[in-house]
Image (cartoon, helix red, strand yellow):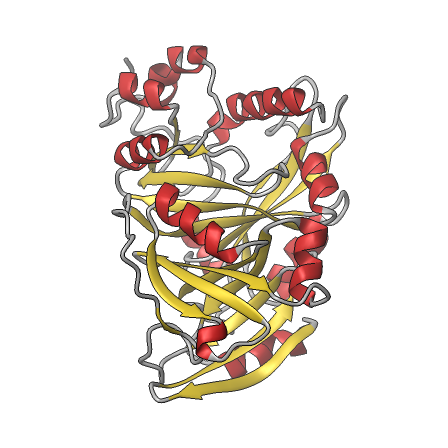
Amino acid sequence: MKDLTAVKDFSYSGEKIFAAAKDFLPINGTDYVELYVGNAKQSAHYYKTAFGFQSLAYAGLETGMRDKTSYVLVQNKIRLVLTTSFDPDSEISNHVRKHGDGVKFISLWVDDARKAYEETIKRGAKSYLEPVEELDKDGYIVKAGIHTYGETIHLFIERKNYNGVFMPGYVKWESEYNPTDIGFKYVDHMVGNVELGNMNKWAKFYEEVMGFANLVTFDDKDISTEYTALMSKVMTNGNGRIKFPINEPAKGLKKSQIEEYLDFYRGAGCQHIAIATNDIVHSIAEMRKRGVEFLHVPGTYYDTVADRVGIIDEDLKILKRLGIMVDRDEEGYLLQIFTKPVEDRPTLFFEIIQRKGAKSFGKGNFQALFESIEEEQRKRGTL
């Protein structure tokens, strides 16, 4: 087995990239991710049971909310909000009818929501929500929002003057059913799928409107098989806490995973949420016990892992049994695995990732990953 800890094969310098990102929009991290879903109560039960999320907050009829209900789940720094409408003609219901369950709000934690809104609007963002204060006995939050790809929204959340459980209008969600967490830490990145020809448009949006920088670019030579391909640009903010890869389909002999997503989601949207863990072996073993399904990685993939990534801390036999992939860049290595879609439409899925120094996105795993996805597409008859 080779020791490849000094390999220098990744194509960017993190410090240079982060320095290139503008500082007019400082972001502290991901505040919460909100999904519009068909049944929030049942979805909350799934994410608690299968992903180890804990009950945090609730808003609905019992709290005076007459048109919708929301359940807020938490695991370390991750907050997941699941919202369902009571009105079949509401924006929420229309969103679910068109897209299925999907990400509506990618909310960003900022110190000054008004300034974040003003800075992005003057640089060309389309307004979704002008700055507004929401208050209760625990203080107030300020939030504002702008449009991004598809019907996805970025909310700016300022909560330095709020001490409540989540937000005004929510109460603590008391539940006797709280499965143990499985070690999720924070949102590592969130991936958007956009239509052919729109990747550069949205990369430019994040650069010019939000001050992000292009961390790395993958073309159809990097991400392709005999049949399908895609292109991707990864955009990051100045401190590197927010990373948004933007994917578009590339020409291929058959329909790519991006085209399949766009067909079933009925447009651009968030393809997957990547969640970081400090012990991926434990996290995935727990998820498998709880019924989460993952993409199948061909056993032959592991025949060359040692030569490709060098010495790692984990037992390769255990990684193979769990289906966890490994890749290395100039900073270190990472371990990653992808769930199958978490709903009936082949749209939203999750990536679980553990970074051991690496700042990249698993380029060495793309071939095996694409072949696994194509096998699932064949089963669905959509390749």
In the rendered image, residue 163, in percent from the top left (x then y), is placed at 31, 80
Q: Is residue 73 left or right of residue 20?
A: left
In the rendered image, residue 285, in percent from the top left (x then y), is placed at 30, 30
Residue 279 appears in which quarter of the rendering?
A: top left
Q: Is residue 231 left or right of residue 300?
A: right
Judge whether residue 70 can be spotted in this image: yes
Q: What number of labels is visible?
A: 0
Question: Observer-nearest residue: 70 or 159?
Answer: 70
Residue 324 appears in which quarter of the rendering?
A: top left
> Which image quarter holds the C terminus?
top right
Judge whether residue 200 can be spotted in this image: no
Question: Observer-nearest residue: 140 or 328?
Answer: 140
Question: Observer-nearest residue: 378 or 60?
Answer: 60
Q: Is residue 339 left or right of residue 204?
A: left
Vertical placement of residue 39 versus 339, above or below: below
Residue at position x 53%, y 62% in the image: 83
Residue at position x 60%, y 24% in the image: 376
Residue at position x 59%, y 50% in the image: 101
Residue 85 appears in which quarter of the rendering?
A: bottom right
In the rendered image, residue 238, in percent from the top left (x then y), is placed at 45, 62
> Which image quarter holds the N terminus?
top left
In the rendered image, residue 96, in percent from the top left (x then y), is placed at 66, 55
